[in-house]
Image: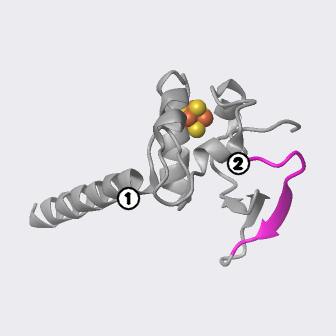
């Protein structure tokens, strides 16, 4: 698909083979898992916005990018995409990597607790 999405998408994605042999789409150096739905990107609030805004220098403000995300109707999809795809850099779904790391940690703890509960039953 042609066009850009927050600078994360190249006009002509190329396919690559992941470490487990699966086909992946490489966009802007980011390897997307093939089973993740990305149709939501067409409705993103950041279409046409300077991609650099979403990849601020270390220590720079993320306020402007988060402001764009605040009004985005696909914010949750974007955030889930980043969480599932393990995006390490940039603002996705209105959250920084540190904020996403916190969510991933919380979810891991919840999965562990659920597993322990299931074992105890
Ligand atoms: S949440 Fe932010 S980065 Fe994600 S699609 Fe919307 S505007 Fe773009």
Q: Main secondary structure of the magenta part?
A: loop
Q: In the rendered view, would you say 114 is above or below 78?
A: below
Dot label at residue 101: 1
In the rendered image, is residue 77 in sight? no
In the displayed structure image, the side of residue 97 where residue 50 appears, left or right: right
Indicate the position of residue 6 as horizontal and vertical percent values: 68, 40
In the displayed structure image, the side of residue 97 where residue 5 appears, left or right: right
In the displayed structure image, the side of residue 87 where residue 52 appears, left or right: right
Q: Nearer the viewer, residue 24 or 48?
A: 48
| Residue lying furthest left | 120
Label 2 CA crowd tier, 10 Å (few <14, some 14–19, many 20+): some
Indicate the position of residue 48 as horizontal and vertical percent values: 75, 30
Callout 2: SS: loop
Q: Nearer the viewer, residue 85 or 20?
A: 85
Q: Pointer 2 and pointer 1: residues touching (CB < 8 Å)?
A: no
Indicate the position of residue 93 as horizontal and vertical percent values: 50, 38
Q: Could you tell me which residue is drawn at 62 percent across and 42 percent down?
A: 53
In the displayed structure image, the side of residue 45 where residue 104 appears, left or right: left
Judging by the rendered image, the residue that carries numbered circle 2 is 8
Q: Which residues are magenta?
A: 9-18
């Amino acid at each position: 698909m042609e066009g850009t999405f927050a600078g994360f998408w190249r006009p002509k994605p190329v396919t690559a083979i992941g470490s487990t042999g699966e086909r992946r789409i490489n966009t802007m150096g980011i390897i997307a898992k093939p089973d993740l739905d990305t149709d939501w990107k067409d409705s993103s609030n950041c279409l046409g916005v300077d991609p650099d805004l979403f990849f601020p220098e270390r220590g720079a403000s993320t306020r402007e990018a988060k402001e764009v995300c605040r009004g985005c109707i696909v914010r949750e999809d974007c955030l889930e995409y980043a969480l599932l795809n393990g995006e390490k850099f940039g603002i996705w779904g209105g959250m920084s990597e540190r904020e996403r790391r916190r969510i991933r940690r919380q979810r891991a703890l919840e999965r562990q607790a659920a597993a322990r509960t299931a074992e105890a039953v």
